[in-house]
Amino acid sequence: MEGVLSKAGRSIHRRRSMIIIISLASVLVSVVLISQGNEFDDGNSPPTSIESGRALELVSEELPVVSTNNVNYIFTHESLYWDDPAFEQGVRDSLDGLNEVSLGVLEISLPYDNPEDPYHLARHVSIDGHRIAAFVEFNGTEEEISKEVDDIMSVVDSEEMEVLVTGSLIIDYDFDRMLEEDQIRAEIIGIPLSMVILLFVFRTVVASLLPMAVVMCMFPMATGLAFYVSRWFSMTQYSVSMISLIGIAVSIDYSLFMISRFREELDKGQDVEGALATMMSTAGRAILFSGATVAVGLCTLFYFTATHMPSMGMGAFLAVLGALIYSLTLLPALLSLVGDRIDSLPVPFLGREREGRFWEEFSAKVMKNPVRWLVPSMGILLLMGAPFLHVELTAGGLDTLPPDLESRQAYEILEEEFPAFTASVVPLVVVFEDSQNPFSKSLSLGISEMCQQVEGVEGVVSVDHPLCNPSLFDTEIDQWPQEQRVVWLTTVSDSIAMINVPIEYPSGSEEAEQLIKDVRAFTSISEEEVLVGSWTSYEVDMKDHLRERIPVALAFVLLVTMVLVWFQVHSVLVPIKAVLMNILSITASFGLIVVVFQDGLLAGPLNFTPQPLDLMVPPLVFGIAFGLSMDYEVLMLSRIHESWLETKDNTRAVSEGLQASGRLITGAAAIMIAVFSGFIFADVMIIKSIGFALAVAVFVDATIVRAIVVPSAMRLMGRANWWSPSFFSSRKNKGSTSSNR
């Protein structure tokens, strides 16, 4: 009896025009969804599901005009010192350009405001005296100011001095801009390279163009759905990057499998309808299992709720969904339309060589001496993965930006050359109870005790806030010192108060992490709810979160994947072997990203600063690469299983499966590597490292693991590969007694 997928192939053949029209209509609907915009969250900020993220959210909602709206201008003169009248006049003339910014300026802080105060000078004047820092606070919310960033950066200029611009807003702006540029650059690199590889694989223009149709439909569909989903599900700008990163690769990959099988069946003499039916029941079934395994890997990302991985997982999931839908509907319809003309427009200089010759010879060698091939291959994989044993992890920071980026360079100058510049500030967010009066001495008395304890924590510079000084509340606010009045008006609302605590340690350091833990020990005993913010706090939260959830996520993906492979091949040992092989290839990629990014092997060519890996990179790469690696496992196993069902000869089945899938896997891997390589040249560090890790994982999997380790291991396991409990044995497996060779 003909299977469901075979019937689907014949149905698509008869209704191809309707399916093509529906596919085009879905693209138009997707464009409409995109035109309505999105509600993406800021991927540069901690998620609101954890303490540090909630603290930031409350500050953004209740205190829209805060110190984060401060933009830093650094003026440098090669010969003049800061106190030279010409230097001062040049600075003031340059800052006059701020009058052109539509937003008002709340305050401009310069060294000339209080030249008698040593701390003030140490904050505004560099050690050598040739630089000054001007801190400009704009009158507007963070969102309003972000729309004026271009003007803010350009209106302050000088012919006599070098002017650099930085600050959290500028850095975030640069980050978002680079993320968009990275995506465009990757597509410019990846898609043309993929097209070239397709020409080498198919050797005809017509066959090579068809996968691009799937890509052109997948991308707007996945992006439109991402925009739509963002109204209910927390999404970030990373989501679209993941659609591009994963969607293009799997769309071309799935199309390659389908088209190759269609051409193979035509070459056997089948008509177009029969070739489509066979293609759907074999390659179609394989990519369904493959898509399912990718989905399983991506599901693990949704479990890490204290990170931005769920939004990245959703973007990748929508991309895979779109790739599957169009590969199983639009592509068969187009193949039906093209039919025997699939080999039209051959590439002259490539020609049609005898397929499988290399893989026939190679598989014979592997089958003859499996141990000789298996042992050194396993050794290479373990050696490649060994550097991961000394991996260091961080939540990221300024070092993740390109070293030649102006906003980063300027910020580093502030940290290194301005003695009193406070680069690391820990905000303590006091949440008031409903109807509680913030202007209360009793409230201040309770908070002041906490302030004293926090101030005693090693590494804390000071804790200075009106709520920490109960004596102020003996008088009205208009009688307070000017500085205290400004602090109160800018950091206290009806719902919260923000107490900024400067610390000595740089953000993300081990000392800063311990300080956060010590501070939380005191804030937790406060009668008021006190949230500890900062990037370091986020890093502490993330590490605890990942440490708790990674084992559960790992167990889930391994178990479900084994079940899926079991249903595909009706075997107990093959799924276990498949999972172990995938772990080996991913571990090898982990080791190499440590060598490259942490140890800095390619820091120069790839334009980055050696640093610990981002905390999200290992689970992200594992979740994505595990599923993608199963593409090749499923493809190879499907061909091996087909041969096994026909011959019941394990050695022959493995050899024929390798011959049938080897060339195809090589081409598919080359395409994925081409797509991922485009992201290796990204400016955003997390995208760069993920692109590199996925490219390496695919390369290792397609060459060492899939070409050598898997077939040699299956050759050694013999008929045990196909053992399954009798109640689950396929009827197709009964009645054969061929011996293992």
Image: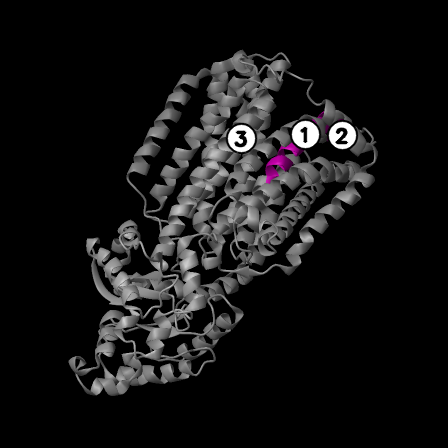
Residue kind at label 3, given as amino acid type: Leu
The residue closer to the viewer here, 297 or 242, is 242
| Front-most of residues 527 and 342 | 342
Give the percent coordinates (x, y) of residue 192: 50, 29
Q: Give the quarter of the figure containing the N terminus.
A: top right
Give the residue pinned by disc 2. 363
142 horizontally vs 561: left or right: left
Residue 564 makes an appearance in the image: no
The answer to the question of whether label 2 and label 1 lie on touching residues, with beta carbons closer than 8 A, is yes
Q: Residue at x 41, y 61 (%)?
A: 411
Q: Earlier in the sequence, mark 2 or mark 1?
A: 2
257 relative to 323 in the view: left or right: right
Q: Is residue 559 above or below residue 455?
A: above
| Magenta stretch, residue numbers | 629-654
Magenta stretch: includes residue 644: yes
- Of callouts 2 and 3, which one flags the residue occurring earlier in the amino acid sequence? 3
Q: Residues within 10 Å of mark 3 (few under 14, many from 20)?
A: some
Residue 352 falls inside the magenta stretch: no
Which residue does the numbered mark 3 point to in the structure image?
A: 193
Look at label 2 and name its amino acid.
Ser
Marking on residue 597: none
Residue type marked 1: Gly
Secondary structure, mark 3, is helix
In the picture, measured across the screen, residue 717 lies left or right of residue 268, that is: right
* Residue 233 percent location from the top left of the image: 37, 49
Residue at image location 49% in from the left, 22% down from the top = 209
Kindly identify which residue carries mark 1: 662
Please name which of the two marks, 3 or 1, marks the residue nearer to the observer: 3
Distance from the alpha carbon under mark 2 to that under mark 3: 28 Å
Q: Is residue 208 above or below residue 684?
A: above
